[in-house]
Structures are given as structure tokens and as C-alpha cells.
Image: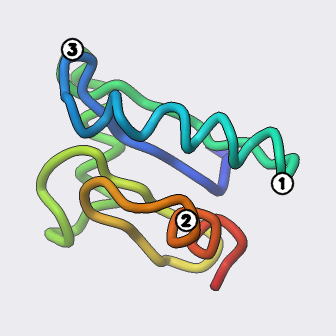
């Protein structure tokens, strides 16, 4: 998987649903792509999350930047999400 920005989420997860408009805004404004991976109904995606998580979070939403190794555990505000995505 070559994607650098990952979001792991659960389909019925309220905080995950709340983050979707922020992700869409970030992708539109910054012209970046965040790969969204549903983990509650996909064992394969859950295994990818486990490899990235390494005990940092243990739940969703979980954001992981493969380039910087930085993560966000849980929901967050737009500016923090943007900083994470841009490597800050």
C-alpha cells in the first residue's frame, strides 16, 4: 500500500461520521488524498490498522501518516487534522 495518509474508521462510529466532512474539506482544499479504511466489518483492514496502530490508539477513528509516523487518536478539529496531513 503506497498511500501515505490513512484513516481507520467504523461504519457506525459516531465520531468517525463526524470526521467525514472535515476529511472531505481537507482533501478539497489541500488537494490531498486520505485513504479511508473501514475496520469494523473488514478483517483485512483491521489487520492493516493493527500494524499501523502499534498500541497508540486501539480504537477509531485512527489517523496515521505513513510518511511522518504521526497519528491522531479519536476525533479532532480541522486545523489539527490539516497539520497532521501536511506533516506538521
Above or below residue 42? Residue 50 is below
Mark 2 vs mark 1: in front: 1
User: 10 Å neighbourhood of mark 3: few (<14), some, or many (≥20)?
Assistant: few
What quarter of the picture does the C terminus occupy? bottom right
User: 10 Å neighbourhood of mark 2: few (<14), some, or many (≥20)?
Assistant: many
What is the distance, in whole Å, between disc 1 and disc 3 at their CAs?
30 Å
Task: Residue at 34% x, 28% y: name it.
Answer: 17
The x, y position of residue 35, in whole percent, is 59, 37
**Which SS class for mark 1?**
helix
What is the distance, in whole Å, between disc 3 and disc 2 at their CAs?
22 Å
Q: Which mark is residue 62?
A: none
Q: Is residue 41 left or right of residue 72?
A: left
- Give the residue number, with chain letter if any, for mark 1: 30
**Which SS class for mark 3?**
loop
- Give the residue number, with chain letter if any, for mark 2: 65
Task: Pick whichever, 52 or 36, lies toward us.
Answer: 36
- Give the residue number, with chain letter if any, for mark 3: 41
Task: Pick whichever, 68 or 14, lies toward us.
Answer: 14
Amino acid at each position: 500500500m503506497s498511500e501515505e495518509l490513512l484513516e481507520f474508521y467504523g461504519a457506525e462510529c459516531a465520531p468517525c461520521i463526524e470526521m467525514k466532512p472535515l476529511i472531505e474539506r481537507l482533501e478539497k482544499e489541500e488537494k490531498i488524498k486520505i485513504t479511508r479504511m473501514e475496520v469494523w466489518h473488514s478483517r483485512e483492514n483491521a489487520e492493516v490498522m493493527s500494524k499501523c496502530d502499534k498500541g497508540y490508539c486501539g480504537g477509531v477513528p485512527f489517523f496515521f501518516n505513513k510518511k511522518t509516523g504521526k497519528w491522531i487518536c479519536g476525533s479532532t478539529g480541522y486545523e489539527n487534522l490539516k497539520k497532521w496531513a501536511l506533516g506538521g
